[in-house]
Image: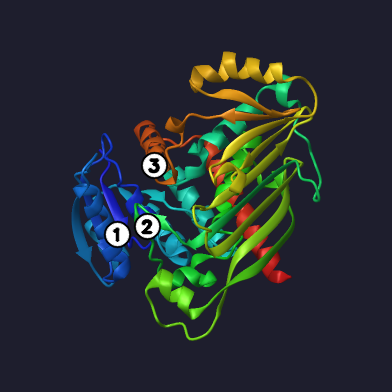
Amino acid sequence: MIRIMSLNPGHFHAGLIHKDMYKNVDSTIHVFASQGPELEDYLSRIEGYNSRNENSTSWKVLLNESDNPLTQMISEAPGNVMVVAGKNDRKIDYILEAVKAGFHVYADKPLVINSEGFKKLEEASRIAEENGLLLYDIMTERFEITSILQKELTQFPELFGEQVIGSVDDPGISKESVHHFSKMVSGSQLIRPGWFFDSGVEGDGLVDVTTHLVDLIQWTLKPDSILEREDMDMLSARLWPTVLTPYQFSEVTGLDTLKSDLAVYCNGEMNYTLDGVHAKVSVAWDFKAPEGAGDTHYSKIRGSKANLIIRQGEEEGYVPQLYVELIEGEGETLNTIVDSDLQIKYPGISVEKIEEALFKINIPDSYRIGHEAHFAQVTEKFLKYFENQEIPEWERSFMDIKYYTTTEASRMANLE
């Protein structure tokens, strides 16, 4: 039985994993935290899930307020899994102390935001592995249906061909996303803590959201493979700011403490190679999405016979869509793969010809469960690993290379 201890829940992701109940997870959450609005938001979110009309949860919160929640948690030890989602600059310190105390760790990304933190992650990973403890981060984007199908289609050489190596100017795989400070979560306006806009606490634009995109590149290019650090070579990296006015800052934080414009270095781009393939990752933040829009994602994987492209722009109604752009071959090959192979795993998907050599994969709405629901799916994966009392070696290597990649990009950008 998993007994959860939630330490200083400062990010709304800490609450999202409790949007559902899980088999073999104790319904009591032992919360160790300091007083403040972030704790109040977390408790309110849990209460909202418990009291909703449909699919209500039945979590019971045992709150332990303290000026030193970490010390109290370790001393009392009422659970066996620490969940942490909050200030990114101190997250790795919590993780390291937790594994030293014999706790499993289930943590929101990013686990680290700089090279110093990465060294601590190395130590925490070693201790966890030596003592049979699980250390796992919440990679929700692996469960987005267009990313899943994009990855699936790379496994059919008769359609995709071979992975194109590419170049810095035209990479073999690229992933870009645009996010927004002002957004709705679980039907309510998201209030972000003031520290979210401090890159020294939250991390800069190369170490936060980029974690998901770097993970997807590894997961797609080298599925189930054990990666080594020499497989990655960082070529270039840069950062640039989004400027918030005091009014905008107040709107998303509820704070009136900002007296002048604030430059937030939340935007980043990196170019690197993974196992020789050129990869590009780019993340940008705007204040608020246009009416009817939201966060967007673009991804392109180049094969010698076809390009696999995810778009989520205005033309797609800001809903991610997967396209297949044929370079060689006929659409019949794609139809055959979808009808005879993918339909078995994902009943209901189909192929639509958009124009000559360009096809769209039609995906039933039942597969589009949304970002919030992905937290339950990742948690189920963690529970499976917990049941087996082991995280696969490829997962451990992915974590190491992923954070090596992001922190190396940040180091390079901040030196230039």
Residue 5 horizontal side relative to residue 319, left or right = left
Left or right, 132 with reference to 268: left
> In the rendered image, is residue 138 in sight?
yes
Question: Which numbered dot is residue 12?
Answer: 2
Q: Which comes sooner in the sequence, label 1 or label 2?
A: 2
Q: Which secondary structure, mark 3?
A: helix
- Could you tell me which residue is drawn at 49 percent across and 49 percent down? 125
**Number of numbered discs overlaid on the protein picture:** 3
Q: Which of the labelled discs sits on residue 289, or is there none?
A: none
Under mark 3, the amino acid is Ala
Secondary structure, mark 1, is helix
Q: Return the mark for residue 42.
A: 1
Q: Secondary structure at mark 2?
A: loop
Packing grade of label 2 (10 A; few <14, some 14-19, many >=20) is some
Mark in front: 3 vs 1: 3
Q: Is residue 140 above or below residue 74?
A: above
Mark 3 in CB contact with mark 1 (< 8 angstroms): no
Residue 373: mark in rendering? 3
The answer to whether residue 328 is above or below residue 25 is: above
Name the one closer to the observer, 60 or 255. Answer: 255
